[in-house]
Image: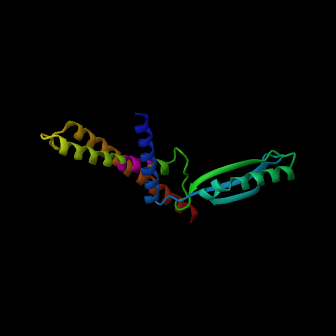
């Protein structure tokens, strides 16, 4: 039973990664190393704009830069800020962001469609009296799937409007 849950989780993680590839999400991170001066203004000492995979592979460079800057400014409180975003759209990729909700919704739809195909194949093979038009479980499932697709479409529309608003602001 535990093995099935782990397998389900891995399957969902693969669906989520596939959804991110299909949505062409480019994960980047903006890293800023700063301190506050006596007036309370932030003074940026160094910044990086990197692909997220590169940052994860070379975290030691950031830590080394923080240590070096702390040695250069021993009386200052050095802070490092991370901002995760999508390079193509400029939208944030935090846990509760619209872009991640869209990818999760797409992964849930993919997973649900696969489960539906498995259910139909099993019922057609093992249930002589199976009727797709009157099966209560299948009808309820189709309603839930329709709701998920509507949620996905609404999120997609919201992201398009946010991207358009960002492009208008930058002009």
Q: Main secondary structure of the magenta part?
A: helix
Q: Residue at x 38, y 49 (%)?
A: 152
The C terminus - image quarter: bottom right
Residue 154 in sight here: no
Observer-nearest residue: 76 or 124? 124
Residue at left offset 45%, top offset 40%? 6
Using the image, determine if residue 87 lies above or below residue 70: below
Q: Position of residue 151 (x, y in %)?
A: 37, 46
Instruction: Name the quadrant containing residue 144.
Output: top left
What is the magenta range?
104-110
On the rendered structure, is 26 left or right of 127? Answer: right
Report whether 124 appears left or right of 169.
left
How many numbered callouts? 0
In the picture, measured across the screen, residue 5 lies left or right of residue 82, that is: left
The percent coordinates of residue 48 (x first, y second) are 69, 59
Looking at the picture, tell me which residue is in the foreground, 51 or 143: 51
Q: Nearer the viewer, residue 61 or 122?
A: 122
Task: Name, please, the residue furthest toward the bottom.
Answer: 171
Is residue 122 visible in the rendered image? The answer is: yes
Quarter of the picture holding the N terminus: top left
Q: Position of residue 78 (x, y in %)?
A: 78, 47
106 is within the stretch colored magenta: yes
Q: Nearer the viewer, residue 20 or 75?
A: 20
């Amino acid at each position: 039973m535990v093995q099935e849950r782990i397998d389900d989780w891995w399957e969902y993680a693969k669906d989520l990664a596939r959804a991110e590839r299909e949505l062409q999400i480019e994960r980047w991170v903006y890293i800023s190393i700063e301190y506050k001066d006596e007036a309370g203004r932030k003074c940026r000492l160094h910044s990086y704009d990197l692909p997220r995979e590169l940052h994860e592979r070379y975290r030691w460079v950031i830590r080394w830069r923080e240590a070096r800057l702390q040695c250069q400014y021993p009386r200052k409180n050095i802070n490092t800020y991370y901002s995760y975003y999508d390079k193509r759209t400029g939208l944030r990729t935090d846990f509760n962001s619209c872009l991640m909700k869209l990818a999760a919704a797409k992964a849930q739809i993919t997973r649900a469609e696969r489960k539906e195909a498995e259910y139909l194949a099993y019922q057609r093979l093992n249930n002589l009296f199976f009727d797709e038009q009157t099966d209560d479980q299948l009808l309820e499932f189709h309603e839930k799937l329709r709701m998920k697709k509507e949620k996905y479409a609404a999120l997609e529309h919201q992201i398009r409007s946010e991207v358009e608003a960002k492009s208008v602001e930058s002009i």
